[in-house]
Image (spheres, rainbow, N blue to C red):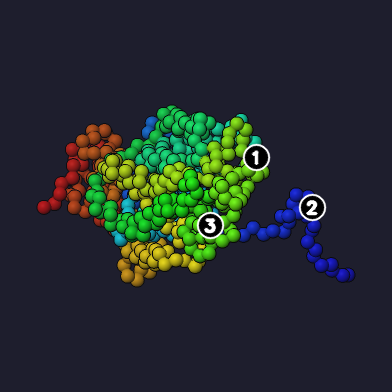
């Protein structure tokens, strides 16, 4: 019996060109997967702390059937999962952490790909947003920094941040959506349905986290003003539809309650972000100068630059095309008009206008009926290129979306203040310089001198920020060689909850117990509560045990004591703890 050799099956029809092609992971998919695994393990190894008890208590209330008018759609979904599966509030938070991280990572990758096609730019953006912050650890949600992210992955703010990145990416892509489509409306634009869906997304962000919703709306305005071309009535109507739908979702839905935040000085905030600002602000300045330093030529002071998809590479520096603008290497002859290559982009009255520039070839027929080619692409000409007049959108430095994003988020932080929770927008504000650095440093080599200096400064800042403020999130305390700043490790109250029934009130003023016990479904009561069923006391090691109380259990870590009152009707008077002198 003979064995025949395995022969690849022939592919026919439309699949012939794709037959046998193996799909490979992109650099961002590979490093993003490793980052997802690392942060998921880091999140699961840390005990709950800080605001985790408040979020778990909201899930426990919905699981028990208690209606709360101040819950967001995110918490409602968590409560539905808890009721269907029987999971506790803490278990639901643990489950939502990896899912929130997945939304966040995909949103960041999509946003950077809107800014530049360079394959390693999303990888650098992920690294910079994770470690390039400051020498003091940042607290709270709204950021991708390692230390705060390791403890807040299950929070609604992490999910809202991921949705914000997705909304900005879709807004930037729709504002600069110059791809030819098969089915368009009478004006040559896409259907308004996508704008309405984007408005729903912004409304959901505002309901899940109102503070991040304000920052997301400001970022949407920045990306729209920085990337939209060819403003006319139909375009205005579509963006107005987005705003109306978002406002309707916010007005009709229930949003989460934002607790007042403790006041923090702005100089303390500066120590949390100065490493990102030191190289990031020059990167933003380079993006603004790249638009204003273009050589204007011709009697009408116009410049021939590509439009459409290639225009991003000219201005944002995507791939080798940035050398044509910055004048690095012999490719600058294509802009300055030195040599025979200038015939491709000669201005009006030159030797060869060329169909790629003037738009008098078949490329201009892609414009929709009833509109000129300049209105279709934002610049005069077909899909391949066009002429930009001085003072237009390409000549204005403030039209860069990252520069606008950084400016509006900083203004919101200064106007709102830390007490109202607007310090949470620090992560959104730093996202602009971090992404600008990623775009600049993902350029192919050889690099000019200024880019090498920028790269070394960024690498040094990233290493310093990781060692000084972020390493403790991924390096366990047991193997910590130098004593990195570690995330807070609050005590667990499993030892006390196993004696307390669901919904039973407990009298305590312990710092950790007040913030964590509601997450177990335990109701907190004060010493003035005269309900007969108050029969549990949780005392710290500095408080004296009342005579009518019996010790049930105690914690070896904190020294706290759980006591049961023997006479429940006299509990409030006897439950007032006295401090030893």
* Crowding at mark 1 (Cα within 10 Å: few <14, some 14-19, many 20+): some
Residue on which the image places disc 1: 365
* C-alpha separation, residue under disc 2 versus residue under disc 3: 48 Å
Dividing the picture into quadrants, the one containing residue 340 is: bottom right
**SS at circle 1:** helix
- Which residue sits at x=48%, y=60%? 327
* C-alpha separation, residue under disc 2 versus residue under disc 1: 33 Å
* Residue in the foreground of this view, choosing between 210 and 506: 210
* Crowding at mark 3 (Cα within 10 Å: few <14, some 14-19, many 20+): some
- Which residue sits at x=23%, y=35%? 529
* Mark 2 vs 1: CB contact within 8 A: no
* Residue in the foreground of this view, choosing between 53 and 306: 306
* Crowding at mark 2 (Cα within 10 Å: few <14, some 14-19, many 20+): few
Image height of 397 relative to 210, above or below: below
x, y percent for residue 113 = 52, 52
Residue on which the image places disc 3: 337
x, y percent for residue 126 = 45, 57
Number of on-image labels:
3
Question: Which sits earlier in the primary sequence, circle 1 or circle 3?
Answer: 3
Q: Confirm whether residue 268 shows in the render.
A: yes
- Which residue sits at x=36%, y=43%? 408
**SS at circle 3:** loop
Residue on which the image places disc 2: 12
């Amino acid at each position: 019996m003979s064995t025949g050799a395995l022969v690849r099956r022939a592919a026919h029809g439309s699949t012939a060109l794709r037959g046998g092609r193996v799909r490979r992971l992109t650099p961002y998919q590979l490093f993003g997967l490793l980052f997802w695994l690392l942060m998921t393990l880091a999140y699961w190894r840390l005990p709950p702390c800080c605001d985790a008890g408040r979020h778990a208590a909201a899930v426990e209330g919905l699981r028990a059937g208690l209606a709360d008018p101040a819950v967001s759609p995110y918490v409602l979904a968590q409560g539905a999962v808890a009721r269907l599966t029987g999971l506790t509030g803490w278990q639901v938070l643990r489950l939502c952490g990896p899912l929130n991280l997945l939304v966040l990572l995909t949103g960041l990758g999509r946003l950077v790909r809107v800014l530049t096609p360079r394959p390693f730019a999303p990888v650098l953006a992920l690294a910079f947003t994770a470690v390039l912050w400051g020498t003091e650890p940042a607290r709270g949600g709204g950021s991708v920094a390692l230390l705060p992210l390791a403890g807040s992955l299950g929070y609604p703010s992490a999910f809202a941040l991921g949705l914000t990145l997705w909304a900005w990416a879709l807004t930037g892509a729709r504002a600069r959506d110059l791809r030819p489509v098969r089915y368009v409306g009478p004006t040559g634009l896409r259907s308004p349905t996508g704008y309405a869906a984007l408005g729903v997304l912004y409304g959901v962000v505002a309901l899940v986290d109102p503070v991040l919703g304000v920052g997301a709306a400001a970022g949407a305005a920045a990306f729209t003003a920085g990337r939209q071309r060819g403003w006319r009535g139909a375009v205005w109507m579509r963006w107005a539809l987005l705003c109306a739908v978002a406002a309707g979702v916010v007005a009709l839905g229930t949003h989460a309650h934002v607790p007042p935040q403790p006041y923090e000085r702005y100089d303390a905030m500066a120590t949390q972000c100065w490493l990102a600002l030191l190289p990031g602000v020059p990167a933003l300045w380079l993006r603004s100068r790249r638009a204003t330093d273009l050589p204007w030529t011709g009697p009408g002071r116009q410049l021939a630059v590509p439009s459409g998809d290639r225009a991003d590479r000219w201005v944002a520096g995507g791939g080798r095309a940035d050398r044509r603008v910055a004048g690095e290497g012999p490719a600058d002859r294509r802009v300055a008009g030195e040599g025979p290559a200038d015939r491709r982009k000669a201005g009006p009255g030159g030797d060869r206008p060329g169909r790629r520039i003037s738009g008098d070839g078949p490329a201009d027929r892609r414009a929709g009926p009833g509109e000129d080619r300049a209105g279709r692409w934002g610049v005069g000409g077909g899909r391949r290129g066009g002429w930009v007049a001085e003072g237009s959108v390409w000549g204005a430095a403030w039209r860069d979306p990252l520069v606008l994003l950084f400016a509006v988020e900083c203004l919101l932080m200064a106007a709102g203040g830390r007490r109202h929770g607007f310090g949470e927008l620090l992560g959104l504000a730093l996202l602009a310089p971090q992404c600008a650095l990623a775009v600049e440093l993902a350029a192919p080599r050889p690099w000019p001198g200024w880019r090498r200096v920028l790269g070394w400064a960024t690498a040094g800042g990233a290493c310093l920020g990781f060692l000084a403020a972020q390493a403790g999130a991924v390096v366990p305390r047991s193997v910590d060689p130098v004593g990195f700043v570690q995330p807070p490790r609050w005590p667990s109250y499993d030892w006390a909850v196993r004696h307390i029934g669901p919904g039973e009130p407990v009298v305590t003023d312990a710092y950790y117990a007040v913030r964590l016990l509601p997450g177990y479904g335990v109701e907190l009561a004060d010493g003035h509560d005269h309900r007969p069923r108050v029969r549990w006391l949780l005392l710290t090691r500095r408080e004296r045990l009342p005579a009518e109380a019996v010790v049930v259990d105690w914690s070896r870590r904190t020294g706290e004591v759980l006591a049961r009152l023997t006479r429940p009707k006299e509990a409030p008077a006897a439950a007032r703890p006295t401090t030893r002198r």
